[in-house]
Amino acid sequence: MNAEGTDTDSDWEYRPLRLPPGITRWSAATQLSIHAEFSGWELSRVLLYSDGTRKVWLRRRRTTPGVPGLLT
């Protein structure tokens, strides 16, 4: 968060995904849930194209790197 208490784009890292047209909505939701559960991603944006292709952007907060050699 910046001084005003709002998020900036530099606070987030993004991962674009492309889901082919043959993927059902249920299957797409399952894949995205797995990314969320095990890697900490959340849904940022979805575009659905007329051919059925979905372009998805996932995001998660950037983490600050730890001190090398320090076990936490």
Image (tube, helix red, strand yellow):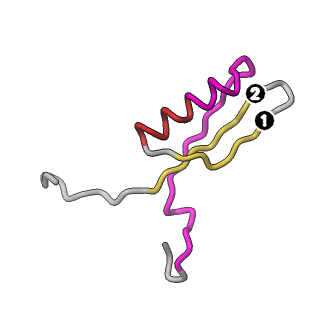
Q: Start and end of the magenta stretch?
A: 5-30
Which quadrant of the figure has residue 39? Answer: top left
| 24 versus 2 height, above or below | above
The residue tagged with tag 1: helix, strand or loop?
Answer: strand
The residue tagged with tag 2: helix, strand or loop?
Answer: loop
Q: Is residue 4 magenta?
A: no
Which residue is identified by label 2? 53
Farthest residue, direction bottom: 4
Which residue is identified by label 1? 48
Query: Residue, x 61% and y 32% (percent of image)?
Result: 29
User: Which label was assigned to residue 33?
Assistant: none
Query: Residue, x 54% and y 47% (percent of image)?
Result: 42
Report x, y in % for residue 54: 72, 32
Q: In front: 23, or 49?
A: 23
Q: Is residue 33 left or right of residue 27?
A: left
Of callouts 2 and 1, which one flags the residue occurring earlier in the amino acid sequence? 1
Q: Is residue 11 left or right of residue 24?
A: left
Q: Amino acid at mark 2?
A: Thr
Q: Is residue 16 magenta?
A: yes
| 54 versus 69 height, above or below | above
